[in-house]
Image (cartoon, rainbow, N blue to C red):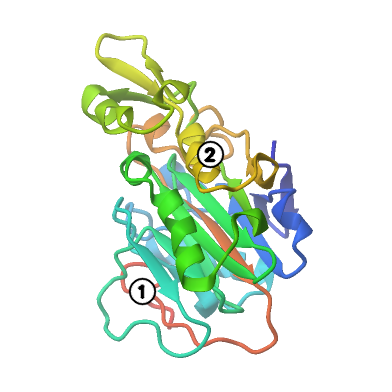
Amino acid sequence: MFPLEKKQSIEYLRSPLLSQCDFLVHAFCTRLGGASEDDYRSLNMSFREGDEEFRVLRNWDKLATAFDIPIENFLVLNQVHGDAVFVIKPHGEYFHSRDPLNYDAIVTNRTNLAICIKTADCVPVFLVDRVKKIIAVVHAGWRGASRSITAKAVRTMQSQYGTLPGDLLAAVGPSIGPCCYEVDEAAAAAFRCLSGSDLFLRPGRRSNRWMLDLTEVNRAQLLETGIPEDNIDLSGWCTKCRQDTFFSHRGSGGVTGRQVNFMMIRGDAPCRVLTINDDLHHVH
């Protein structure tokens, strides 16, 4: 199980496996240590869920201060539950309009850029090429996972940068667990065509309902790409079981905040970052 750590007021998890990479900063943040109240208590990092804007801005400031990363160096996508992967080259502009970045994964070797995934039950997956110093973050809810987005991110690292499976480390962060994630027939059908579906899909407690293990889905995809089993780290935390520590969309009935999960390659020179309209939209 990933240990709970703390920087200033921010409580977060780190993968012991990824922590061996001294060029890396990473955190699977919890809901603890922020300024939001009521349903969004306390470290809500999303402007889109109904929280007061000034509180979300305070939360981003708290995170940036705790990790000593300029707030403008956090990149947040407009996650759309798809399988598109955004590749950011080491230098230059990486988008040319004010349109939102509609992706659910980022791959980059750019330094000083904290690439982010927001979650409240979906699976955050971190990938690290420890030799070439390339990283990826993946938002893998059931729709993205059924389209094998995690495997697609690995293949993107291989095709764009020549990453070798044996050089990859992977950390699968906190998400809703198989103990709590009941899905309907339509969602279950999306996974039956995947190899090894009997390992992550089992009959639920009610008729035409199924219990889905999203962590196992993503672990299976990582193994299928050739990543050694010992190179995969699993958090062991269920967001619905531990609503004292994490936001959970299922557990809250749909009204809740979002925690952020980020990873960054350390570097000396600051990078130029433009933030996205729908998040951090007043911080440029």
- In the displayed structure image, the side of residue 161 where residue 228 appears, left or right: right
141 versus 74 height, above or below: above
Residue plotted at (75% across, 56% down) = 19
Q: Could you say whether the residue bearing mark 1 is in a helix, strand or loop?
A: loop
- In the displayed structure image, the side of residue 126 where residue 258 appears, left or right: left
- Residue 113: give x, y in percent of width and height: 55, 75
Name, please, the residue furthest toward the left: 186
Find residue 54 and report its image quarter: bottom left
Disc on res. 72? none
Of badges 2 and 1, nearer the viewer stands 2
**Residue at numbered disc 2:** 219
Residue type, label 1: Ile
Find residue 8 and report its image quarter: bottom right
> In the rendered view of the protein, which quadrant contains the N terminus?
top right
* Res. 55 in view: no
Q: Residues within 10 Å of mark 1 (few under 14, many from 20)?
A: many
- Residue 219: give x, y in percent of width and height: 53, 39
> In the rendered view of the protein, which quadrant contains the C terminus?
bottom left
Residue type, label 2: Arg
**Residue at numbered disc 1:** 276
188 versus 53 height, above or below: above
**Camera-side residue of 276 and 142:** 142
**Camera-side residue of 224 and 238:** 224
